[in-house]
Amino acid sequence: MTAPLRIGPYAIERLLGVGSFATVWLGHDRVLDAHVAIKVLAENWSHDLRVRERFLDEARLLRRLEHERLIRVHAVGELPDGRPYAVLAWADGGSLRDRLATAEIPAPAALRLLGEVCAGVAVLHRHGVVHRDLTPGNILFRSAGPGGDERVLIADLGLAKALAAASGLTARAGTPGYMAPEQDDPGVVVDTRADVYGLGRLGIRLLAVDPSSAHPARPDPPRRAPAIRLRDGVPPEVAAVLVQATAHHPADRYPDAATLHAALTRASRPAGRPVSPTGGGGPERQPVAPTRASGPVAATGPPPQPSRRPGTRRRWRLAGAAVVAVAALGGVGAEPSDGGSGRPVGGTYTAGPLTVALPSGWSATGATWAGQYGADGEPEPALVLSPQPRRWAADPRVPGAFVGLSASTATRTTPAGFLAERTHGDCVPAPTRTTWQAGVEWTVVAYRCDRGRPQIIESAALHPGRPALVYAQIVPPAGSGPAFVDTLLAGVRLR
């Protein structure tokens, strides 16, 4: 392959890699004296409109997310022959695949690395994106200062899709050994749990004594999960986390990367070290991510079934779970149906057994909790209330609240455990408090955020009359305090 002398304004120095769909060159910007990676669509695919659009989608997606845990896009362009190219940040530390080909990573460092990768994929999941091809070749390293520090980056989103559009992608996509079993079926909707599987397989590759022995047969599900024998220096509790992450059926896995990250952190803690209800052992904070969609929105397609996992989970501050943004993430969202009252009546709104007193000037919408299903298979009730219910999910200036009731959730966790799944890695939590309102004991955690919505309130309680959990996420009006939150919770009536 003959190297071009220049691509756009960049002088080409050498070839970095060749893939099925693209070639990557190392370029140099002489004006800024900086290196970049230039990804060029392969010539044999340049006339395939689907592949061309997917290539450009990757650049658009990375540009839209713009997060330090993801490869950054500087520009896009087109060669004289019409092929598109994307100018990316150069990962000067190479890939995880390169490092594993040289030597095994020491177990403690490998465990920390897996956590960093989970945090990066959690950024994608918070924005409704499934990567679909998490392999060592797509985990890159970039120098992060003169002290020799490195940043772990998630790359190659060419197979990634917004969850709302995932059901329209029918081509088999992914890398054998890391690809979730459902990705073998072109008719299945792939969601964040496919990435959880890939992360679990990556963890097995990094932490298991014999990674190949823990590779389940396909396509039939194994009768029991294969045993995972961990390397010396890895806490034995991590094995159970990896087994659950790589379960054959998506419903048996963790719902997303943030939840897997939290479980991995709990399993990695030294014995006897408690996990407080308000976070981990220190005030570490994750870099701030965009908050474009930081509230419940209407589901755009069939949401996945909730994961069925026993036990109560504790919160870890760096888990990075998003605001209840997209129903298809296995989080929460409201979608309208015929079960709601449709408009405020006497200052209240009703959806099934939920009735909420509306603050002055607020209205409500919604009737079911997307992604949450009762024993009868029907969606469980929920609603969104706000001065502008249709806008509050996308506009951080608009206050509002999401309220949902779930019997299925109450069978697997407590209010405190449920809130542990709803952390905000970009925000700082206040100490957990409890408040009695209208005969219901609420557990409440307030988060302060540097950007986007300045405050997010997470609260949960048990139904006083039957086994069900009620959840309220509140973005209060600017300048309001705990009294507004308590008043809104006091207006929640349960039948």
Image (spheres, grey):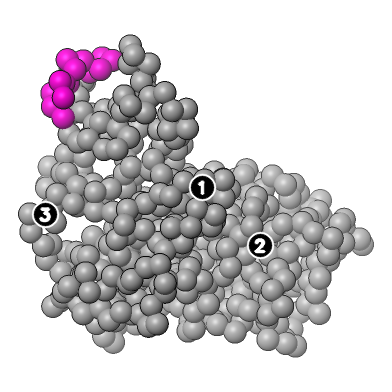
- Left/right placement of residue 156 relative to residue 356 reads left
Using the image, tell me which numbered label, if any, was put on residue 370: 2
Q: Tell me the magenta residue range.
A: 1-15
Which of the marked residues, 3 or 1, is nearer the chain's N terminus?
3
At mark 3, the secondary structure is helix
Classify mark 3: residues with Cα within 10 Å, few (<14), some (14-19) or many (20+): few
Q: Nearer the viewer, mark 2 or mark 3?
A: 3
Residue matched to label 1: 170
Q: Nearer the viewer, mark 1 or mark 2?
A: 1
Residue 200 lies, with reference to residue 30, above or below; the image says: below
**Residue type at tag 2:** Ala
Q: Is residue 256 above or below residue 41?
A: below
Looking at this view, is 103 or 248 the one in front? 248
| Kind of residue indicated by mark 1 | Thr
Query: Mark number for residue 345?
Result: none
Residue at 38%, 43% in the rendered image: 157
